[in-house]
Amino acid sequence: MVDAAIATGDAKKVATVIEVAKATNPADAAELAEMQADFEAGQKRLAEAKAKKREAEIRSAGLLRNWSGSGEVGASLSSGNSRNTGLSLALELNRKGIDWSHKLRATLDYQRSAGTTTREQIFASYEPRYQIDDGLFAYGLAQYDRDRFQGFSGRYAVSGGLGYKLIDRKHLSLSAQLGPAYRSTEFTDGSVENRLAGLAALDFDWQITDRLKLTQDGNMMAETGGRAAVLIDGSNTSVTMTTGLEAKVSNRLSTRLSFKLDYDSDPADGAVSTDTLSRFTLLYGF
C-alpha cells in the first residue's frame, strides 16, 4: 500500500498512507518513517533537477521565446438621435527570465461623435528590468503618448532608476520605482519642449479570488522648468493612474472594468488639466 502511494509521486497521499500505516502497524513505525524520508529526499532531488533544467532553458531561449501577454478590446456604436463610435484596444507582452524581465504595452482609445473625432489617445512603452536581489531591481523605460485634445501631438520620455518590491506574495504584489527622466513634447501648435524630469511609479496587483483581480498602475513625472540640463524650477507635473477590476470568464478570457486618470498641472492652451476615461473591455490572455 505504501509502495503504491509512493509510485504516484503525490506527497499528500504518501503522508496520509504512511500515517495510517503507522497507526495500524506501530511496530513498523521506524521503517515507515525511513521510507517517507527517502521519498521526500527523492522528491527534492527531482524538483532541483527540474528547476535547473528550466533555468537552462530560459537562459538559452531566443529573443522571441517565452513571451506571454494579453490583448484587450472594447467598442461601442450608437445611432438614431446621436451617432457615436468608440474603440479601445490594448496589448501587453511580458517576458520573464532569470535576471531580466521585459514589458511592452500599447493602448489606443478612439471616439467619434456626430462625424467629429472627440478622442484620440495613443500610448506605447517598453520597460526592461534587471533583478539585483530578491526585492531590489533596476529599470529602464521608453515611453510615447499622443493626445491632440490635451494639446500635444507627441510626447516622448526615457527614464532609468531603481525599484523595490515592497510586497511579493502569491496573491498580492506591490512595487515602487524612482528615477530621473528626460521628456520631449511636441505641441499641436508646432512648438517643442525638451526637459529633465523625475519619475515615480507604483504597480499594485491583488488576486482577490481565483476569478477576480484588482490592478493599480500609476506614475508621476515632474518636469524641471529649464531646458535640457538646466535645472531652474518646477514646470509641469503629469500624473497617470489606471485602476482595473478583472473578472475571469474562462482560463483565457476575462472582462475588465477600468478607470484611467490623466493630469497635467500646466496643460497646453485650450486644454483642461484632468482627463478621465472609463472602459469596459474583453481581455484575452496568451
Image (cartoon, grey):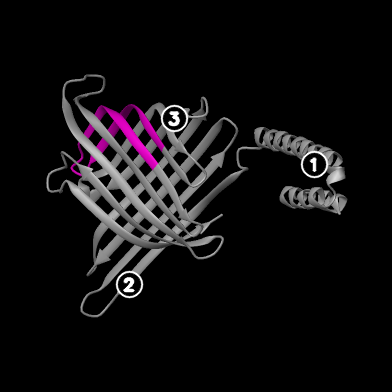
Cα distance between the residues tagged 1 and 2 = 64 Å
**Residue ID for mark 2:** 77
The reply to whether residue 149 is visible in this rendering is: no
Residue type beneath disc 1: Gln
- Dot 1, crowdedness within 10 Å: few (<14), some or many (≥20)? some
Label 3 close to label 1 by CB (< 8 Å): no
User: Around disc 3, counting alpha carbons within 10 Å, would you say few (fewer than 14), some (14 to 19), or many (20 or more)?
Assistant: many
Q: Which residue is mark 3?
A: 139
Q: Which residue is mark 1?
A: 36
For marks 3 and 1, the one nearer the N-term is 1
The reply to whether residue 53 is in sight is: yes
Estimate the x, y position of residue 50 in percent, counting from the top left: 73, 39
Picture residue at 82% right of the left edge, 53% below the top:
24
Q: Which residues are magenta?
A: 175-203
Q: Which numbered mark, 3 or 1, is in the foreground of this view?
A: 1
SS at badge 2: strand
Judged left or right of residue 169, residue 24 is: right
Q: Position of residue 12 (x, y in %)?
A: 71, 50
Verify whether residue 196 appears in magenta: yes
Q: Is residue 243 above or below residue 34?
A: below
| Near-viewer residue (121 or 170) | 170
In the rendered image, residue 19, in percent from the top left (x then y), is placed at: 76, 49
Q: Residue furthest bottom?
A: 80
Residue type highlighted by circle 2: Leu
